[in-house]
Image: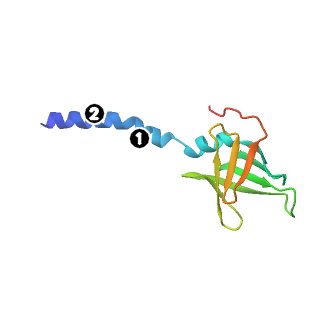
Amino acid sequence: MKKLLKTLTVALVLIAAPFVVWRLCDDPERRKIEPLVGWWRATAPDGALLRIFPAEEGYRITVRRPDGPRRGRTYRLRYAFCIHYTDDAGARIDLFYTPAADALLLMPGGRTFTRITEFRNHER
């Protein structure tokens, strides 16, 4: 009986080990945000631009509006169930994108953006 229990324990460990290693080594923030790196243009005629770029501590998004006293604001992008950032007022802004990563939707607000720069495969 002890031998059977030991065999089942070893089998369970061997089955679970790849999943545990994958979970420890996976970086979902990089995997989800990296395809969005580049410049985006608003579909509305207001001329707003977005730039998503890698930074030392993760990824950042710069929102540029041609009208207004400040030309652009930069925020830290995060990933928790979806990609988001927190604006100056403390509101959470969620980013949703198409599977081809060529269109971007910011919620709340419903602002849509299309990619300006060519998509590059960021897989290493």
Task: Left or right? Give the position of 2 relative to 99.
Answer: left
In the figure, 8 relative to 41: above or below?
above
Q: Position of residue 91 (x, y in %)?
A: 65, 65
Task: Left or right? Give the position of 115 relative to 68.
Answer: left
The residue depicted at 41 percent of the width and 38 percent of the height is 19
User: What's the amino acid at mark 2?
Assistant: Ala
Task: Tell me the distance, in whole angstroms, between the alpha carbons under discs 2 and 1.
Answer: 14 Å
In the picture, the quarter occupied by the C terminus is top right
The residue depicted at 84 percent of the width and 62 percent of the height is 70
In the figure, 103 relative to 78: above or below?
above
User: What's the amino acid at mark 1?
Assistant: Val
Q: Which mark is drawn over residue 11? A: 2
Q: Is residue 55 visible?
A: no
The residue depicted at 72 percent of the width and 50 percent of the height is 112
In the picture, the quarter occupied by the N terminus is top left
Q: Is residue 79 visible?
A: yes
Q: Earlier along the polypeptide chain: callout 2 or callout 1?
A: 2
Q: Position of residue 54 (x, y in %)?
A: 70, 45
Residue tagged 1: 20
As drawn, the residue found furthest toward the bottom would be: 89
